[in-house]
Image (cartoon, rainbow, N blue to C red):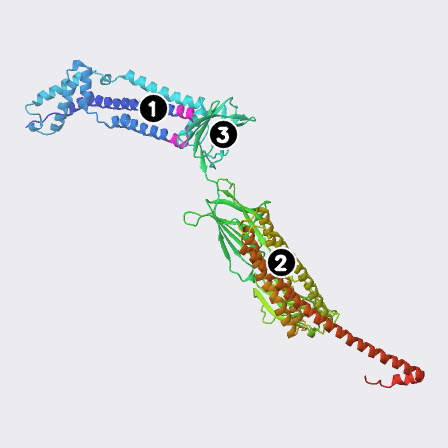
Amino acid sequence: MSTWPADALETQLHERIFRPLALLRLRCRVYLALQGLRRLLFVVVGLALAQLLLDRCFRLSVDQRAVPAAAITLVGLWVLYRHVAAPLLRPLPNAYLAALVDRAHPRLCDQLATAVQLAGDVQMAIGVADDAARLPRGASPDLIREVLRQACLAARGTGFLEVLDHRRAVRRSAASVGLLLLVVAAFAQLPGTMGTWFARNWLLQDVAWPQRTYIWPDGFGPDGRRRLARGDVAEITATVRGEVPATAVLEWVTASGRTGHEAMSVVGDTQLVASIGQLSEDVRFRISGGDERTREFVVEAAERPRVTRVVARITPPAYTRLEPVVIEQQTVLELLHGSTLELVAELSKSVRAARFLAADGTDVPCEWTRGGPDAASPSARVAWAEPASGTYRFDLVDDDGLTSQNAVRYTLKVVPDRPPTVQLQLSGAGELITPQAELPVELVSEDAYGLGAVRLHVQMGSQAERTIVPEGFAAGERKLSKRLVLSVAAQRAAPGDRLRVWAEAADLAPGAPNVATTPVMTLRVVARDEFVTEMARRELLLRQEFERLRTVQRGLQESLRQMVAGLATEGPRPGPISQRLAGLSRQQAEQGARCDTIARAFEQILLEMQVSRVAGATDERRITERVVLPLNHLAHDTIPAAGAALGALARTASAEQQQACAEHQATTLREMDEILANMLEWEGYREAIAALQEVIQDEKDIRQETLQTLERQLDDMLGPEASDEKTDAPGPER
């Protein structure tokens, strides 16, 4: 087996072929990288320029600016991978490069490509003796060696780098450098514009573009949002810095798609004002004026805070012993003085301040809770220990500064604890009483929250006042009704004295209880004879009044007789006659009412006589059976029947009706005559008794005068000394 001398051949192949191919590979990769970087630079700069122009013209918001920045980043990364990283990572084999050189130098006749291929086979066989199997089949080692030697000779003086377009590479590199210089120059010459672009689009800062005019709507924060009350007129006011534009336009669009343009008015030197109408939904808008086109701002339609439900808890004062009262959804509250008021108002939204204001703006202490997802709904609470009358309202301010409007007014009526009611009645007692009178006293007192004290006060003449507490009364009772008997004799009364009686009641109000007092009832104490005489006088007046009624009744009977005489006994009555008969019917009814009044007056006389203990059994039977009962029958039966007959006669005429009217009139007069006879009979009896009493009194006076005359004659007969002795001696018993 023979071995090939490989050292010289390998050296020639490395120096003449493989080393130039390695340089060519390196230069190819450099040119590919420059080409990819150029594309990347142009793409990024172009997109950045488009981004600058877009943001400069339309003043994009932060989120809008973030989208182009992200897109440019993604496109740049794709170009970097596609045109820089991928070509650099792509393999460039020697065979491919040798073929390129062969194509560029036709005189080589593909010797380099053949040599590179054969060199690979030889490299596998170098250093292996007699190993012909390592060579291509049918190849002669000497022939291969000769081909490689010829290729090395042909490669001498061949420019491998001539296969590359160096001028184009230089031009592309120059364009890239020029573009970079242009970018650097832009940053150097326009630092404000380029810095603003970089800060706005890559640092995502909210920096304004340098310009002559700057417009910013008032009340809008960095986020470009402002909440206004739904239903209010949305007026946009903007502040201008720099050059004030000659015209400015507000462009708006609602959430539902409605759009509009409003010309803004210049107010003062730095204000622009425009209205977008009543706010019913969210509105987005921009302002254009001069070289300014603002970013997009948003007006959010928010509900004003309001009270949705109010629960009032009224705790009455402790002395009333009443349970607290809970009232819902009422705007007028009535409270007893001294009550405690607690109001809990549920709110439509969270608030940052809540006040309970009076009509004059006075604050009432108020607490509120914000509420939240895990808490109850927001509410305001008013705890008022001493509420005052007036009109009040809740004043609310939410987190956006929106205040409540058209708040519901709450009217508080603090009413004082009214004094208890007290009534005093002396049943059957008149202005005159006798020393033996027993006065029936009816005492009624009532208080809504409980009586603290009830007292009856009695004073006889100049004597000290006496206080009587009803038996069985206990403080705290809401109503008291007692019947007492007040003995005048027990008050040591004498004729000529005046008895004063009154009552008072106090409630349980602490501090200064409310006191109610009845009017003072004054009664005059008279002797029995004087009292009886007064009762007789009143009976006389009532009898005279009854006589007048009897006279009127006779006149009414006569008028009826004259009216119906000669009239038809059948058929309807003529109008004038019917009216006159109806008038007689009304007059008859008045007669009955006056008779009833006289009966009540006689009953009162009897009651006063019973109270003063001067009424005997005879008086009671006489007044009751012979006067009051007949008068009641006359007033409630006889006279109404006569009036009804007259009314029927006024409507239709008939002989039976005329006869009935005449009979009723006769019956009425007959009963009146009987009652009057009873009255006159008693008066005659009383007159006889009075005359007898006068005779007896006259006899007493004559006897007294006779005794006095005898004493004077005796004094004249005995002289002064005897008179003195008689004076010292005890007088005779008469």
The foreground one among 508 and 471 is 471
Would residue 7 be found to the left or right of residue 269 on screen?
left
Would residue 495 be found to the left or right of residue 48 on screen?
right
Residue at the spot 71% in from the left edge and 66% down from the top edge: 537
Residue at the spot 64% in from the left edge and 71% down from the top edge: 622
Three-letter amino acid code at the position of disc 3: Ser
Q: Earlier in the sequence, mark 1 or mark 2?
A: 1
Is residue 600 positioned above or below 285 on the image? below
- Residue on which the image places disc 2: 591
* Real-space Cα separation, disc 2 to disc 3, in angstroms: 85 Å
Q: Quadrant of residue 108?
A: top left
Would residue 392 be found to the left or right of residue 12 on screen?
right
Q: Earlier in the sequence, mark 3 or mark 1?
A: 1
Three-letter amino acid code at the position of disc 2: Gln
For disc 1, the neighbor class at 10 Å (few under 14, some 14 to 19, many from 20) is some
Q: Which mark is on residue 41?
A: 1
Q: Which residues are magenta?
A: 52-66
Q: Earlier in the sequence, mark 2 or mark 3?
A: 3
Three-letter amino acid code at the position of disc 1: Leu
- Can you say which quadrant of the picture contains the N terminus? top left
- Residue on which the image places disc 3: 275
Q: Quadrant of residue 73?
A: top left
The foreground one among 154 and 210 is 210
Front position among marks 3 and 1: 3
